[in-house]
Image (cartoon, rainbow, N blue to C red):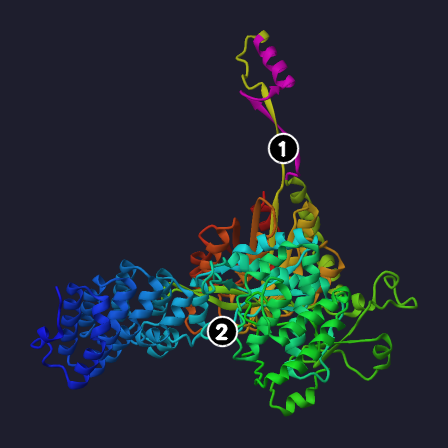
Amino acid sequence: MLIKLEDYAELLEDLSEHSRAALNAGWHDATKIFSPRGLDNYLKGVSAIRGLGRGDSLVETWIEKAPMVAKEVGEDVVGELATSSLVLASKTSGAVIELLLATAPTAANRLGDAQLFLNYLQFVNTLIAQAPRGVRPMLDKLEVLFQHLTLGGLRRWALWGAHAHRTNYEEQIRYFGLESKESLAMLQKERKGTLLIDVQRRINMYLRALWARDFFMRPTSGDFESREGYKPYIEDYLLHLPDAFDDFAPEGREPVSGLELYRATAAHCAAHVVETREPISAEALNPLQMAVISVIEDARVETLAIRRFPGLKQLWAQFHVVTPAQQARVGDWLDRLARALLDDGYRDDDPWIAEGRALFAAARDKLDSHTIAWEIGVQLAHSIGAKKLAFNPRTDVLAAPYRDDNRYFWAFEEFDFDKAAGAGYESIKQVRKYVSVVEMANEIDVETAGDDAQEIWVLGTELFPYEDIGPESNTQSFNALEGKEPMSDPFHYSEWDYQIQLERPAWATVLEKRTRAGDLAVIDDITARYKREIHRMKFLLDAMQPQGVQRIRKLEDGDEIDINAAIASFTDIRLGNQPDPRIMMRSVRKTRDFSILVLLDLSESTNELVQDQAYSVLDLTRQACVLLADAISKVGDPFAIHGFCSDGRHDVEYYRFKDFDQHWDETPKAKLAGMTGQLSTRMGAAIRHAGHHLKLQHSAKKLLIVITDGEPADIDVRDPQYLRYDTKKAVEEVARHGVVTYCMSLDPRADNYVSRIFGQKNYMVVDHVARLPEKLPLLYAGLTR
């Protein structure tokens, strides 16, 4: 049956001339897509949308986009699309409905299934009821969202934002517009593709099998909206790879999995690390010369790697898909040169490509030297100037996704802080400057560098004392005696928001800070003051069962006969008495398999003096830790003593006074003597980080003892219940990994909240704070008996 537009003149009589012209223009294409029944539904949809009275733009969007949706997922969904638009008319504006129709082809293309598309329409209908201000910004970013998320991931991402910002409309708009950090964090959590964390172990084993050495990798992520910043790079001998890779699907070829792309990327970066002996000087080079030299250097390290492992050639070649027809920009020529130097079977007759191949082939016996890349690159950069193409360093980059940004092998001039300040840089990154022994020795007018120092001077080699300056001078260098330990990378942890009943991903940042050594005499004074308590505890510690074999006697069913009990029973029989049938015994191996971590609250309130005393809560905490550490070290359990304070969610400071693998000697004692109280108490993040350290222990039983003088609080949190619920959630999280958390609170009002956080049997309120040094070791003995 042939349907003519004239047959629907009565149905379409309300259309404006402009809308009728748009329908006439698209009718021919529509008849190729729709069946007669589909055309009927399509035209009825035009009339229904017009009946909403929301303007010609909405009608013309339907006329243009409905056939595109039918082409992607079938014409059966067109009727549902019209129905959804009519239903939404009572809930939202015509602009949102128009945006829904305009983005419907994108959703249909990404979903590729009629049922999934119907589920998507249902999801939008639900979201409008929960987050009416968020639908429009979400639809604006729909193409970006579907590049990262499946429909299930999009639904979880959107509903999290709807619940988190039910009444805050400004934050709702920022979240759904991908403008807030929460939005990007949830997008990262729900994104699709191959995640580095899922394949990192396999990639490590792959590199180890090739080069018989370990390479250290870290994930990095770029801008979520423009997909920039995903270029791999090497820095400080670490391979920084994108946190996720989509499958590589070039036009006209079979797609390559994300795992295969990770293998190629990691192998290429590893080849740079292995084959780069010296950096290449960037002095007097322009950006075009540097770009060409980078291509040659990539080819050099790959050629050396392929000589040892020929299979790498096939691995890398599948990601080069450029053809001789691509020549619009300099980046196309660089891609063609990169492919020509790797793939001998690639045909490209351009004279510049032939020149590059000839120069590289002539230098194949000299590829061990990095200067070859400089020489060939400079010559080819001069030759490509004849093509009269403008070069843009930002856009003319290599298209092969596994190639890194080549920062690793470039040696740039020393950073000029005066020029940087003059250019408007408010904060300048601290840099390390490697100097000779003579430079270090001659620089006498310098103070000890702090965290705000612009330069940190580092010797290329260790320097040892040339004269006797102490008992350790013969074995330790100046760096070991006087240097500072480098700070760790930040740790990001989620937080539980009880009001929205959701986790805020990567919300709190824990920074492990250096501990400062104090006066050891402070620890010696504590030991002398509590000499009587230490002596009294000796009997308690001796009673704690050491590991070994223990015999359990007087059993009716055991492994062997207890001779003494058997003789006593035989004697009873001869005397006519009822014998004791328990004449067996069993040997049981008793082992202590505990790991204990003591987590100290080091907030500002610990500096307050104890009532009617001349010492502070911090002094008592230090005394208790000394007695506890002395007790645990005698039993032999591995233990650690850490502390924390906070200055907002972005700065939870974490201090490690003693780690599990350290001996209880002068070093941790000096760190305990130097601990101070400051800032606030963000307890949940600290407990999660302490749980992270405990999870690394292989003990069967793991115990976390938290010592605090108050409830969780921080400067950026006004609701007192917020951090209490988050701490409770943190206790539950570490418990899933076998960590038992016990709280010793010095707050006399702690009964109001501490039991809800840690549980009815997992806390103790110390009524008399002065007795803390006595009670803490006894608590340890009771928990680990």
Nearer-the-camera pick, 263 or 449? 263
Q: Which residues are magenta?
A: 545-573
Q: Nearer the viewer, mark 2 or mark 1?
A: 2
- Can you give x and y, in whole percent of width and height, for residue 655 in the image? 63, 65
Q: Which quadrant is home to the N terminus?
A: bottom left
- Can you give x and y, in whole percent of width and height, for residue 165 in the image? 35, 72
The secondary element bearing badge 2 is classed as loop
In the rendered image, the vertical position of residue 631 relative to residue 243, given as above or below: above
Name the residue that disc number 2 marks.
223
Callout 2 touching callout 1 (CB < 8 Å):
no
- Can you give x and y, in whole percent of width and height, for residue 316 in the image? 59, 61
Tag 2: amino acid? Asp
The Cα–Cα distance between marks 2 and 1, rounded to whole angstroms, is 57 Å
Name the residue that disc number 1 marks.
589
In the rendered image, the vertical position of residue 703 relative to residue 67, given as above or below: above
Q: Residue furthest right?
A: 467
